Image: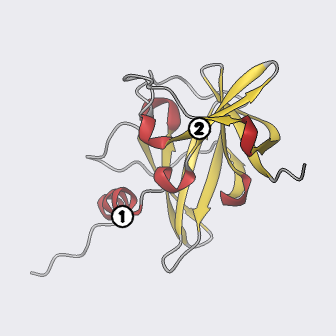
Amino acid sequence: MNESAEEYLTFFLDNEEFGVDILRVQEIMVWSPVTAIPGTPSYLKGVINLRGVIVPIVDMRERFGGVAREYGATTVVIVLRMPGERATVLGLVVDAVSEVYKVTNDQVRPSPDFGSEINNQFVHGMATFPDKVIILLDASKLLNANELYRLTRMAVPEKSVS
């Protein structure tokens, strides 16, 4: 049986393990201060200038409706990139990076309705292993171009004409 596998970088949020397609991961950075943007949702921590690219930084715990916590020694930012005509880049603040898993199609199950805890629109499926289940996130939905464009416009407002 020649079952194809995809690789997922896994990370923790409140002791739950999540995975994102490794092909979307541009880099992993230690947490460092960001430029806060007034008037944006609390989950948008601000923006950073990453080699000339303005990158919105989103706290995934808050994005999923959880309570904000102090960032610690293991807190990292996973920078995701979606290729395309206008490459979209987003930084995800997570508690800690775990490891890379190879996930075959037969290990992925549809995601159940999580209620209000996690917006199901971001979930690709559930990767099942003998000792755990990993929530696989859909990077393309996390990198929703319309929402990121709106958030980035808040971060870099157009100059007004007097």
| Percent coordinates x, y for residue 35 in the rendering | 45, 52
Mark 1 — residue? 149
| Percent coordinates x, y for residue 38 in the rendering | 29, 47
Q: Quadrant of residue 74?
A: top right
Specify how the rendered protein is coloured.
Answer: secondary structure
- The answer to whether residue 89 of the structure is visible from this angle is yes
| Percent coordinates x, y for residue 66 in the rendering | 45, 23
Mark 2 — residue? 125
Q: Is residue 121 above or below residue 15?
A: below
Q: Which mark is residue 65?
A: none
Q: Is residue 16 above or below residue 10?
A: above
Instruction: Please name the amino acid that badge 1 sits on.
Output: Tyr
Q: Mark 2 Cα within 10 Å, few/some/many (few <14, many 20+)?
A: some
What residue is at 50 percent from the left and 26 percent from the top? Answer: 112
Out of 134 and 88, give the one closest to the viewer: 134
| Percent coordinates x, y for residue 55 in the rendering | 51, 60
